[in-house]
Amino acid sequence: MSPLQLDEFVGQEHILGHGKMLRRMIQADQLSSIILFGPPGTGKTSLARIIANTTKATFRQINAVTSGIKEIKSIVEESTNYLMNPSGRMVLFVDEIHRFNKAQQDALLPHVENGNLILIGATTENPYFEVNKALLSRSTVFQLYPLSQENIREIIERTLTDPDRGLGGEKIRLHEEAKAFLAEISQGDARTALNAIELAWMTTSASPDGWIDLTAEVIHECVQKKPLRYDADGEDHYDTISAFIKSMRGSDPDAAVFYLARMLEAGEDPAFVARRVVICAAEDVGMANPQALSMAVAAWQATEMIGMPEARIVLAQAVIMVATSPKSNKAYLAVDKALADVRTRDTGEIPFYLRNAPVK
């Protein structure tokens, strides 16, 4: 069900809507190097396939997980060979480009710069952290967002009605509550929704009237568990911990506990979470409630001693306490100001009456 042309593409209207720059670039076949950044199942590879189907330039695709400098050199040689590449233009799609190390990314740089290669890089990680800065400066970054529930519903409808690439030729009834459940639990990932429908269709027996009924219970069995977009070393980790800290700082216990649950469910180290609570108790609560620091440290120690799943209760208690406490950053500001003075100003000598030796 991958779209073959732009009119079939669902979602990402902010970059592919009528009149938007990326759409104009693709339609005019005037691509420059681009980086597509977004979570799985949002259309990065589909966009590359659409470009492959529409461009007059030679199109090549590699995956950074399995490819290296040898493949890059081979493609570069092909791009400069008039017999193999008569158009003189070559579009190279590198999936998972963040998997390339610095040397591999550097191997692309001169050929992107001189125009031999038009690079399309796809990544689920923040390119400003993972992609060579020189390569980034020669590319335009387009961010893709999780699909909306309406987008997922549209893709499901197409799948069930398309007789050629979808299941339009099959006698399938997807119940409305099942469709709503699937649109929500897919978390903006079209691949999750399509995989669930395919598995349900393949494993569900037809009813006496010959129709396959896909109920909410059937779809739930096929999905099993809601997929969490969370990478302990990636962008989701930093975004979630940032939202967690800002929720405590902003005195929003409901949001803080939500982000706590999100981290724990994804397998985040409870001790890491506890340390962030201790820091928030000192930095943001501070002198407004000095006891908060002692309670946060106690929660950290209890978390280390008892572990999960019971530690979730200890952490929730500490998070709610920090979030609902009055806030004062006087200690934080005071020590930073003192440090700045020590580093940058002439602070003189320690007065005699404060020194270790007795005053004569």
Image: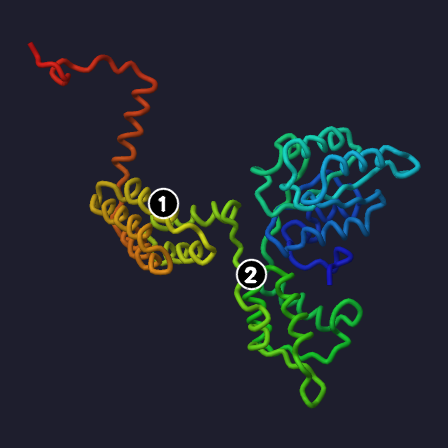
Location of mark 1 (residue): 276
Label 2 secondary element: loop
Q: Residue at x 68, y 59 (%)?
A: 10
Location of mark 2 (residue): 187
Q: Nearer the viewer, residue 143 or 170?
A: 170
* In the image: residue 337, left or right of residue 157: left
Q: Residue at x 78, y 36 (%)?
A: 117
Q: Nearer the viewer, residue 275 or 125?
A: 275
Q: Nearer the viewer, residue 195 or 186?
A: 195
Label 1 secondary element: helix
Position of residue 200 measured from the top left corner of the image (x, y, whole percent): 64, 74
Quarter occupied by the C terminus: top left
* In the image: residue 258, left or right of residue 16: left
- Circle 1 or circle 2, nearest the eye: 1
Q: Nearer the viewer, residue 19 or 263?
A: 263
Position of residue 47 measured from the top left corner of the image (x, y, whole percent): 72, 51
Position of residue 343 measured from the top left corner of the image (x, y, whole percent): 33, 20
Quarter occupied by the N terminus: bottom right
Position of residue 280 measured from the top left corner of the image (x, y, whole percent): 32, 44
The amino acid on which the numbered mark 2 sits, given as a three-letter code, is Gln
Q: CA distance from mark 1 to mark 2?
A: 27 Å
Q: Is residue 153 above or below residue 342?
A: below
**Residue extending farthest bottom:** 208
